[in-house]
Image: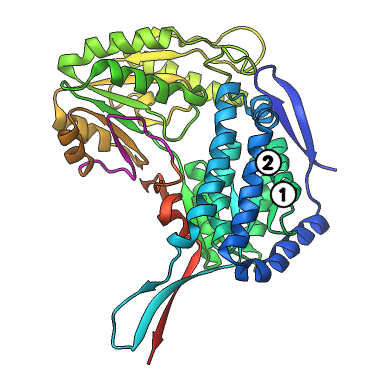
Amino acid sequence: MTTLRSINPATGRVQHEIDVLDDGALEARLGAAQAAFPAWSTASFGGRARVLHDVAALMREDVERYARVMTDEMGKPIREARGEVEKAAWCAEHYADHAERYLAIEGLDSDASESYVQYLPLGVILGILPWNAPFWLAFRFAAPTLMAGNTCLMKHDPNVPACGAAIGELFARAGAPEGLFTNLPLETERVAGVIRDRRVQAVSFTGSEKAGGIVASTAAAEIKHSVLELGGSDPAIVLADADLDKAADTICLSRIINAGQSCIAAKRIIVEASVYDAFVERLHERLARLRMGDPAEASTDIGPIAREDLRENLHRQVGETVEAGAQCLMGGELPEGDGFFYPVTLLTHVTREMTAAKEETFGPVAVVMKVADEDEAVELANDTDYGLAAAVWTSTKRGVAMARRLETGQVAVNGIVKTDPRLPSGGVKRSGIGRELGPHGIHEFVNAQQVWVA
């Protein structure tokens, strides 16, 4: 029997092994998801909400257990892991409480005596998820999809099979109908067959740009809708009139949360020349205070990189950037010992042609770039194939005006870029297609049916 093996990135040793589904078991789970759809699609919003509230309650009652699975499998510091479980529960509760309003029938004027749009479920929806936020991303996909009346299949990343199993078991523990939410422990090469299965109506994917292209093309060949949340090289712009201390506090957090392994982390820090040195000094001070270590310890700020190959690629990016002329003020060296740790690294005087500015850096590496003024800052921020999110630090009025000039799906003015169940999230350009969360996210996997009455 083939297994999915997760390696504890803090030790480099195998942590969990989960058997993959054979063809018969996969067929049974696909059949169960399809069989569960008719009753669930006609259930009341209140009936659906009860299931989501029960699942959320189980997560809140057992935060420590679920947080520890994440910490063991992908190295998320335990404090952050606890917060992720709570956030996943919040997402389930939010859609349980607001889905009916988000999907209310919309009346439209026409030549009919009555005309309107009603939002109807599609059927079985497949979610293909990454390793970096195992619980949050599962519920970001599942909560709106389920509350819209669909059933869910979850194919989680092979690096977090125990997280996938734990999420699947949550629904069973909550007494959800069989097939409502189904975990699919599968090898990556078998996913295309699931996308093509006639019972699957649409696909949600979060992950790399390359893999997203494969998923989207496979779905498109079957005339199926897909939502993609891909990579980002998010700019954080700091102008001369910014509160430098608050900007440094927030950008430091944005860059190092989850050891920097976040699509919406601040990756290119673009600073106006007149305050460049003062800001770098503040950022350096804050980064230097952070403690790297065992992610299971509450005092740890920075855990390991999730996989050895990811650490090697990050180190390549840092090395090439320094060789090209950037200054490394701290970090940048592979530590000795077990695990896949990488130190907090600060690169300054980075220019747009350098590797760390051109490629997405997935790790605790802060890249600081200098510009002459606001116009150059916006031009540099937009000079990327990605368009996920951006942050602007300046006066409120100026920042709001700048948001319209930034080619991203999300802008934070004087705050941290984050995902919130109440607000839509997603990218433009090569960062993705469609939106998740908020009222926009729940509309991705519905049939917006127009009804005209004579």
Question: Are the residues tagged 1 and 2 within 8 Å (C-beta)?
Answer: yes
Report whether residue 164 is seen. Answer: yes
Q: Position of residue 18 (x, y in %)?
A: 78, 38
Vertical order, 342 against 48 (above or below): above
**Residue 74 figure quarter:** top right
**Among the two numbered marks 1 and 2 on one chain, the one whose residue lies closer to the N terminus:** 2
Q: Amino acid at mark 1?
A: Ala
What span is in magenta? 405-419
Q: Which mark is residue 58?
A: 2
Which quarter shows the N terminus?
top right
Report whether residue 130 is seen. Answer: no
Q: Residue at x 44, y 7 (%)?
A: 289
Vertical order, 276 against 158 (above or below): above
- Mark 2 neighbour density, 10 Å: few (under 14) some (14–19) many (20 or more): some
Q: Position of residue 342 (x, y in %)?
A: 53, 15
Q: Residue at x 35, y 9 (%)?
A: 284
Which quarter shows the C terminus?
bottom left
Residue furthest bottom as drawn: 454
Instruction: Report the residue marked by disc 1.
Output: 174
Q: CA distance from mark 1 to mark 2?
A: 7 Å
